[in-house]
Amino acid sequence: MAKGYWIVHIRVTDPDTYRRYAEVAPAIVKRLGGQYTVDAGRAETAEGDASLDRHVVVEFPSYEAALSAFRSDAYQSIVHLRHSSADCSFTLAEGA
């Protein structure tokens, strides 16, 4: 079965509020079956728009698991922190 992914590009606009999100999100994601494979380390935009400069990839056992985790009450309970503190592109994708 193909894995599922959250592919997220972020520009933090309110570091204090975003920090609150970042402090609780990993435990929720782990409990929902996700594993961070990329978490805002070094990055270089080789082509395209670099306005979103923080990058995160979370792997799940399947696309359905990624979708379910995103829609879960646990994750949705903290989304307002990300929305109010960052510009974001959030994609759910199925792996090869």
Image (spheres, grey):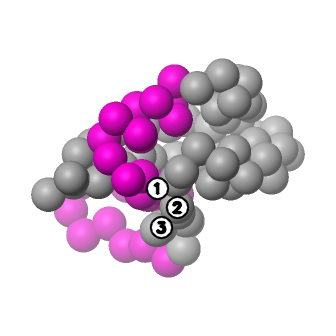
Quadrant of the image occupied by residue 14: top right
Q: With 25 as the anchor, is 89 left or right in this view?
A: left
Look at the numbered discs 1 and 2 and tell me whether their residues touch, using CB distance below 8 Å. yes
3D distance between C-alphas at marks 3 and 2: 9 Å
Q: Which residues are magenta?
A: 42-71
Residue 83 visible in the snapshot: no
**Could you say whether the residue bearing mark 3 is in a helix, strand or loop?**
strand
Q: Hey, what amino acid is under mark 1?
A: Val
Residue 65 lies within the magenta run? yes
Give me the residue at 52% from left, 61% from top: 35
Residue at numbered disc 2: 35
Percent of width and height locating residue 54: 52, 57
Percent of width and height locating residue 30: 63, 54
Name the quadrant of the C terminus: bottom left
Look at the numbered discs 3 and 2 and tell me whether their residues touch, using CB distance below 8 Å. no
Nearer the observer: mark 3 or 2; the answer is 2
Residue at numbered disc 3: 38
Question: Could you classify mark 3 by the number of other residues whose Cα lies within 10 Å: few (under 14), some (14-19), or many (20 or more)?
Answer: some
Q: Which mark is residue 29?
A: none
Q: Hey, what amino acid is under mark 3?
A: Val
